[in-house]
Amino acid sequence: MKFVIEFNWSGGRMADEPDEIADELGYLLTLDAKAEADDVRSQMENIVWERHPGSTVETDVVPVSHNVIAVPNGGQVGYLITLIAKITVEIDYNFE
């Protein structure tokens, strides 16, 4: 039997230059969102394994949308980058 939970995660970062935007989006997706998914997976494993040892818990992170907004900062312009990602948690109780 499998059980699937999906939820949205959002995060944001600032970039000083336009050429930093892609790097910041990558950071949000590969580090921040993945770290959140890993934390959720770990918590769910602890909960599930108490009653069903041998169950497997897997997570997946998929970007849903992003936004870039130019933000005046004195004489410069900064860029606010936001990302929304869907985190899917799949619990397989491995019943036979």
Image (cartoon, grey):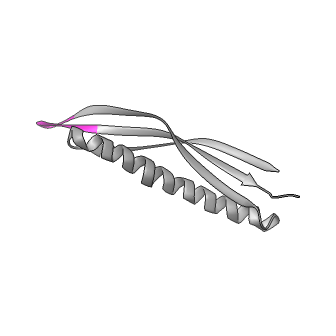
Q: Which residue in the rendered view is the most extreme toward the right?
A: 96
Q: Quadrant of residue 43?
A: bottom right
Q: Which residues are magenta?
A: 72-79
Does the segment drawn in magenta span residue 54?
no
Front-most of residues 59 and 71: 59
Q: Residue at x 26, y 37 (%)?
A: 79
Height in image: 49 above or below 7?
below
Residue 60 falls left or right of residue 26: right
Residue 17 falls left or right of residue 93: left
Instruction: Say how many tags the image has.
Output: 0
Residue 24 falls left or right of residue 4: left
Our reading of the magenta stretch's main secondary structure is strand
Q: Which residue in the rendered view is the most extreme toward the front?
A: 96
Residue 90 pos. (x, y %) = 69, 50
Residue 81 falls left or right of residue 83: left
Q: Quadrant of residue 18?
A: top left
Does the segment drawn in magenta span residue 76?
yes
Residue 62 pos. (x, y %) = 53, 42
Q: Residue at x 86, y 58 (%)?
A: 95
Q: Residue at x 29, y 44 (%)?
A: 14
Residue 38 pos. (x, y %) = 56, 58
In the rendered image, the quadrant that contains the C terminus is bottom right
